[in-house]
Amino acid sequence: NWLGTEPAVSTQLARMMQYLTCHFHPSNDGDWSAPLATFITKLAVYVTQQVGDGDTSIDIDAFVEIIEHNVKQSLMSKISDIVTLSAQALKCLVTLRPARTFEWLLPMIYESLETLTFAHKALAALQALSVSFEAFMNFDNGSTAREHLPRLLSLVLPGIDANDQPKTFA
């Protein structure tokens, strides 16, 4: 497989993701935003499917490390379509490496829901929670979920707003 047996490919992918970091920044949107979000999402879905099909040659830790920063950045985009695509990439990261992903995802969700000065961050946090919820409930035999769920639910409840359907239905 190209991502496990060929370190040059992994190195080039890492260089490309590092180069594109500024293009994934939440405040930097343009004609490139949707194609880049689509690319990183399709890449994450492909790798997750390969791993699910039993491909043991992929260095999962390296792959998650390579793309997670850009997924985090694009998840906070002010463009809802980018957030939706990024949420799908996030779902793949949670599937591949839940412990590593929850390490940064939970603080991000808490911060976004506690400071509601940026509505797009609340929407992103709700979508992130939505796509990762099943893995969250199954992670660590549910002990992590039992620890965080009461606080998360109390933070989510104020976000339910009949006048803001995208946020409510996230």
Image (cartoon, rainbow, N blue to C red):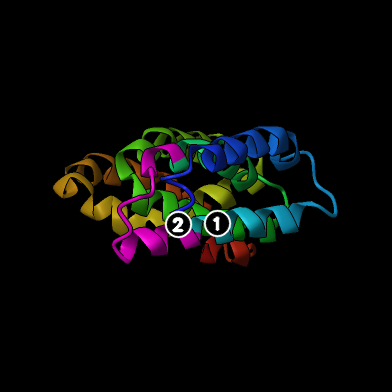
Dot 1 corresponds to which residue? Answer: 43
Q: Residue at x 79, y 40 (%)?
A: 28
Q: Is label 1 in contact with label 2 (beta carbons under 8 Å)?
A: yes
Taking the image as drawn, is residue 157 in sight? Answer: no
Query: Residue 8: horizontal and vertical position, in percent?
Result: 55, 38
Q: Residue at x 52, y 62 (%)?
A: 170
Residues 130 and 98: in front is 98
Left or right of residue 63: residue 117: right
Dot 2 corresponds to which residue? Answer: 47
Q: What's the magenta region?
A: 45-62
Taking the image as drawn, is residue 159 in sight? Answer: yes
Query: Residue 58: horizontal and vertical position, in percent?
Result: 38, 49
Prevailing SS of the magenta stretch: helix
Query: Residue 139: horizontal and vertical position, in percent?
Result: 23, 48
Q: Residue at x 32, y 66 (%)?
A: 53
User: Residue 166's quadrant in the figure?
Assistant: bottom right
- Alpha-carbon neighbours of circle 2 within 10 Å: few (<14), some, or many (≥20)? many
Left or right of residue 31: residue 97: left
Vertical side of 23 occupied by 160: above or below: below
